[in-house]
Amino acid sequence: MELDRRLLLAHCAAHALSMAAGLLVVVPMALNGSAFKGRCALFSTGYWRTEERAELSGLPGQEDRLVVQQWGPPAACQFATFVGIFTVLYGAAQGWRCLFYLHGRHDDTLFSSFLTVLLSVCVLFLSGGSSVILSLGLSSWCDIVTDNNARPYSCIESQSVALNLDVDTSSFYTDLSLAQASLWCVTALWLVQSTLAFLRLYHSHSQHISGRCLLREKEMLLGYSTSDSGSPSPPHPPATLNFLI
């Protein structure tokens, strides 16, 4: 199996995995956005407050209530969703191209390979940045719901605790942690795709250089054979010399 065919097969596999990982980012983020009524929990600010239960339900006693002062910026959640959607669409398009090249037994041009490397590196940095943002945002939300670990439950256990908010918090940790893990997988796959795209660019460049060298050697050989076949015959003795002899 030739080198370019192995690279194409590896690139097809990377695109297929990135599509699956991208879907595992988009779907949980969409479910979390629906449960939170379009609000973003990442980087939200809030505190716990103790209120009289009589004020809330007419029963005596006190009850702790989570108060969200300000919800997080929507761009923090939308950024991760955008990276997931782009990864799915790009993986589908490039996977189809790889299969087409495998069937046609040819690869991208040198310029197209360079653009693929450039785009892969750019999206690698975008996905890495969105992964960091999602991880830090989820950590900040967990600090709020656990009151900086002062509550007797962890962040994942707080899903089953009544936070007394006007949103559904029964699966926020499951959705956001799944999206977080999938987004880091997307980042790792973009690193793999960038490496494979660079190797394909290097292979295309090597093929281009070797092709030009072979063409130059062929032209030199053809020029040499033409000069040999068209070389003039040795000169005849002058007519005056023949006359004297």
Image: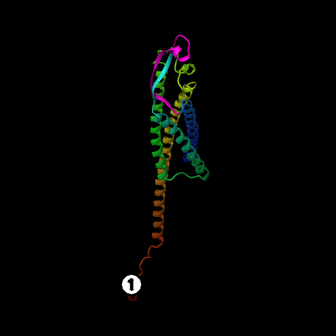
Toward which corner of the image does residue 17 lie, by quadrant?
top right
Residue 128 in view (yes/no): no
Mark 1 is surrounded, within 10 Å at the Cα level, by few (under 14), some (14 to 19) or many (20 or more) other residues, namely few
Residue 83, given in percent of the width and then of the height, sits at 50, 39
Q: How many marks?
A: 1
Up-down relation of residue 56 to residue 6 (above or below): above
Up-down relation of residue 229 to residue 56 (above or below): below
At 47% from the left and 52% from the top, the residue drawn is 111
Task: Indicate whether residue 184 is drawn in magenta.
Answer: no
Residue 54, given in percent of the width and then of the height, sits at 53, 14
Report the residue that reaches farthest toward the bottom: 243
Up-down relation of residue 133 to residue 86 (above or below): above
Q: Nearer the viewer, residue 223 or 201?
A: 201
Residue that numbered label 1 is attached to: 238
Which stretch did the figure color magenta?
38-63
Up-down relation of residue 46 to residue 190 (above or below): above
Task: Indicate whether residue 57 is drawn in magenta.
Answer: yes
Residue 29, given in percent of the width and then of the height, sits at 54, 33
